[in-house]
Image (tube, rainbow, N blue to C red):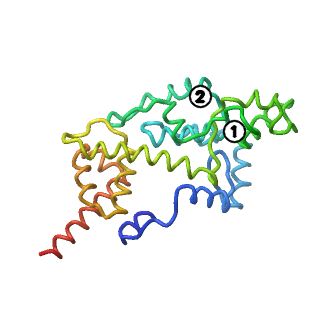
């Protein structure tokens, strides 16, 4: 769908948050996946009988920033955790990290993509639901109960898609700041944040700045560009549009 809008030169009419909200409204979630109503009974039955269907988080292979975020989101949505809880699990996932992808500190990933309950105000619904389900003594307690607050404090959790807009804006700002540095670099980029390049290409496309897309693409390894559908899409379309401009100027 995104490729269609890019080829036509249209702005993509939906944000990541709107897409996630749409999923929640239209489909039924199970283990980090979404199903049609008539598919759910069959999935639940097979899971109950065989016990062989793993959760979505078990199928994620972490090799760059995007997959690390997906892994964290699935893990924290299933079980809000403290930094000390999640860090050992996260470190075990880093063995296959891409050699060209800048490896980010876990705290940076958490700060840019997730929320942490500091013990002030009512316990967030995501944490409350997990704690009340798994600890009998915490059930039916108000969200500001001291015992519940103490158990919930310092846990990281996945933000509600309906309220994640500000968080994504902060993350995009950080990514675009990094992309600006890539634009100024004169030599080839060997290690970089792929998400920053994606964010930069998207913004440049919206601004019809095709020269920037091509210039930065020339700085990253060919195999990275060719193996990433999003980057290749922006790049191919930018080259096409630049060619069209040259034809019209002749």
Q: For the point 26% across and 49% down, which residue is it? A: 216
Q: Pointer 2: what residue?
A: 86
**Residue visible at 30% across and 35% down?**
191
Seen in the picture, residue 147 relative to 228 is either above or below; the reply is above
- Of 48 and 87, nearer the camera is 87
92 up-or-down from 167: above or below: above
Instruction: Give above or below for 81 relative to 50.
Output: above
Tell me where residue 66 appears, x and y as whole percent. Answer: 46, 43
Query: Callout 2: helix, strand or loop?
Result: helix
Q: State which tag comes first along the sequence, 2 or 1.
A: 1
Residue pictured at 26% horizontal, 55% vertical: 212
- Residue 175 occupies which quadrant of the picture? top left
Residue beneath label 1, please?
51
Secondary structure, mark 1, is loop
Q: Position of residue 59 (x, y in %)?
A: 54, 40
What separation in Å lies between label 2 and label 1 (alpha carbons)?
Answer: 25 Å
Q: Residues within 10 Å of mark 1 (few under 14, many from 20)?
A: few
Position of 55 with respect to 140 (left or right) is left
Marks 1 and 2: in contact by CB < 8 Å?
A: no
Residue 129 placement (x, y as % from top left): 76, 41
Estimate the x, y position of residue 180 in percent, counting from the top left. Answer: 32, 46
Instruction: Answer with left or right where residue 225 lies relative to residue 21.
Output: left
The quarter of the picture where residue 37 lies is bottom right
Mark in front: 2 vs 1: 2
Crowding near the residue tagged with mark 2, few <14, some 14–19, many ≥20 C-alpha atoms within 10 Å: some
């Amino acid at each position: 769908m995104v490729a269609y809008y890019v080829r036509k030169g249209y702005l993509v009419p939906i944000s990541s948050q709107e897409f996630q909200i749409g999923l929640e409204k239209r489909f039924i979630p199970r283990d980090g996946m979404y199903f049609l109503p008539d598919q759910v009974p069959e999935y639940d039955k097979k899971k109950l009988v065989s016990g062989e269907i793993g959760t979505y988080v078990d199928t994620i292979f972490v090799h760059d920033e995007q997959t690390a975020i997906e892994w964290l989101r699935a893990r924290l949505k299933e079980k809000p955790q403290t930094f000390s809880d999640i860090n050992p699990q996260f470190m075990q996932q880093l063995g296959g990290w891409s050699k060209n992808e800048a490896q980010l500190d876990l705290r940076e990933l958490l700060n840019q993509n997730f929320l942490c309950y500091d013990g002030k105000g009512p316990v967030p619904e995501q944490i409350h639901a997990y704690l009340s389900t798994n600890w009998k003594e915490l059930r039916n307690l108000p969200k500001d109960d001291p015992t519940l607050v103490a158990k919930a404090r310092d846990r990281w959790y996945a933000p509600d898609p309906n309220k994640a807009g500000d968080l994504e804006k902060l993350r995009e700002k950080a990514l675009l700041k990094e992309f600006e540095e890539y634009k100024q670099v004169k030599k080839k980029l060997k290690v970089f944040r792929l998400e920053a390049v994606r964010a930069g290409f998207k913004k440049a496309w919206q601004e019809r700045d095709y020269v920037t897309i091509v210039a930065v693409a020339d700085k990253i390894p060919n195999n990275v560009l060719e193996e990433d559908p999003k980057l290749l899409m922006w790049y191919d379309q930018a080259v096409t549009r630049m060619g069209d401009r040259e034809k019209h100027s002749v």
